[in-house]
Image (cartoon, coloured by chain):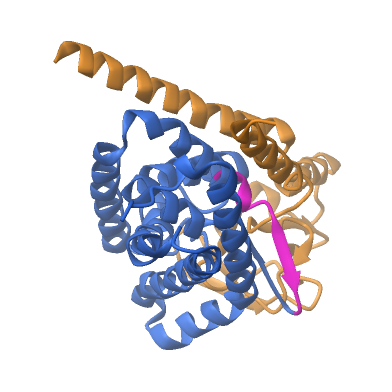
Amino acid sequence: MKPKNRVVLFVILALMTAVPAFAHKVILFAWVEDGMIYTESSFASKRKAKNCPIIVKDDTGRIVHEGKTDEQGNYSFKIPDPIETGLVLTLKAGIGHQAEWKISKDELVLVPSKNNIHNAMQEKEKLEAGPSPLKIISGIAIIFLAALMGKFLFQSKKGLK
Amino acid sequence: MHISEGILSGPVLAAGAVIAIAGTGIGLKKIDYDRIVHVAILSSAFFVASLIHVNIGPSSAHLILNGIVGLLLGFAAVPAILTALLLQSIFFQYGGLTALGVNTVVMAAPAVAVHYLFLPFVGKSPRLSFIMGFLSGMTAILFSAVLLGAALWFTDKNFWETSLIIIMANIPIMVIEGIVTGFCVLFLLKVYPEIIQVKKT
């Protein structure tokens, strides 16, 4: 095998090992049920964000509630009363990691519609989905396209000179 | 190592962006026509490296590979890392888009540093090359951890403690990246020495 081919093979093998793993995407997910706000915090579903502060603000930026996730990355609290606006929940997951979740005023009802919960679950699944092979391949393709464009620009610049 | 959206203040984000743009400019000027493909290969490797997760004990981190990218590319590592980080942010939601400049500085500045610190010694003997590769992989992460601590200092006001936590969390990664980079250097010297710009003495 030619040395260059061996490098290509090496790179392909290295890329293949990467597919099933996850990395530092911080996720905060919250939903409203029976007067309570439930939250789940994780680093892309595999690892729970344990003992991390959760700060709840209203739309004006006023802190209305503060808490901490448990060992499972969960935290729940009563809907603050009285509340006039929607809520913004922020998860502080340490060293530069943070995630947000917004709850609109309409969702802050005592009995949520099934539709609301269904939408929230769908959103959660979308958030927790790992990087698909398609995204990985598209990323690499974009890098090589940029390189090709660079080569082309370089050539045309040389041609002008 | 990826700083999320909404953590850093405006001036820190702006400073990061300015330094990243300047570094990218220098990097783009320094890329030879023949080495554009090398830059793309290493940018891709950096792009996927963060998907390789390492769990050792309580700490959990992912590969970064800024050591090998910097060692081989020098200043050209800045545009390579910027591109990869931009795509990681868009496709995988790692790190905030507004923090792209700061994230680039945190990972690319150490990459450039190891190029000038360790590349002159690569290629002299296999053992020395491995050690230099190991040191590149390790110190790149160490420098990144300190820079990350510095970036967060403006919000945390606790530079040493934050940096120490980041360094401790990344010790397994430092060792693993050191070994990976060491073997990469040996492997490349054997099969594809053109990719390593060893100065002939």
Q: Residue at x 78, y 44 (%)?
A: A125
Q: Residue at x 42, y 87 (%)?
A: B160
Q: Estimate the x, y position of residue B198 in percent, counting from the top left.
A: 38, 51
Q: Estimate the x, y position of residue B103 in percent, counting from the top left.
A: 42, 57
Determine whether, in the image, residue B69 is placed left or right of residue A36.
left
The image quarter containing residue B19 is bottom left
Is A96 located above or below residue B75 in the figure?
below
Determine whether, in the image, residue A100 is placed left or right of residue A159.
right
Quarter occupied by the C terminus of chain B: bottom left
User: Any magenta on residue B51?
Assistant: yes
Determine whether, in the image, residue B130 is placed left or right of residue B176.
left
* Residue furthest right in the image: A114
Q: Which chain is blue?
A: B
Which residue range is magenta in the image? B47-57
Q: Residue at x 40, y 53 (%)?
A: B104
Q: B8 or A102: nearer the eye?
A: B8
Is B86 located above or below residue B52 in the figure?
above
Is A59 located above or below residue A80 in the figure?
above
Q: How many marks?
A: 0
Q: Estimate the x, y position of residue B186 in percent, counting from the top left.
A: 58, 56
Q: A121 or A72: nearer the eye?
A: A72
Q: Estimate the x, y position of residue B10 in percent, counting from the top left.
A: 30, 59
* Residue furthest front in the image: B201
Q: Residue at x 24, y 42 (%)?
A: B25
Q: Chain A, which colour?
A: orange
Q: A96 or A77: nearer the eye?
A: A96
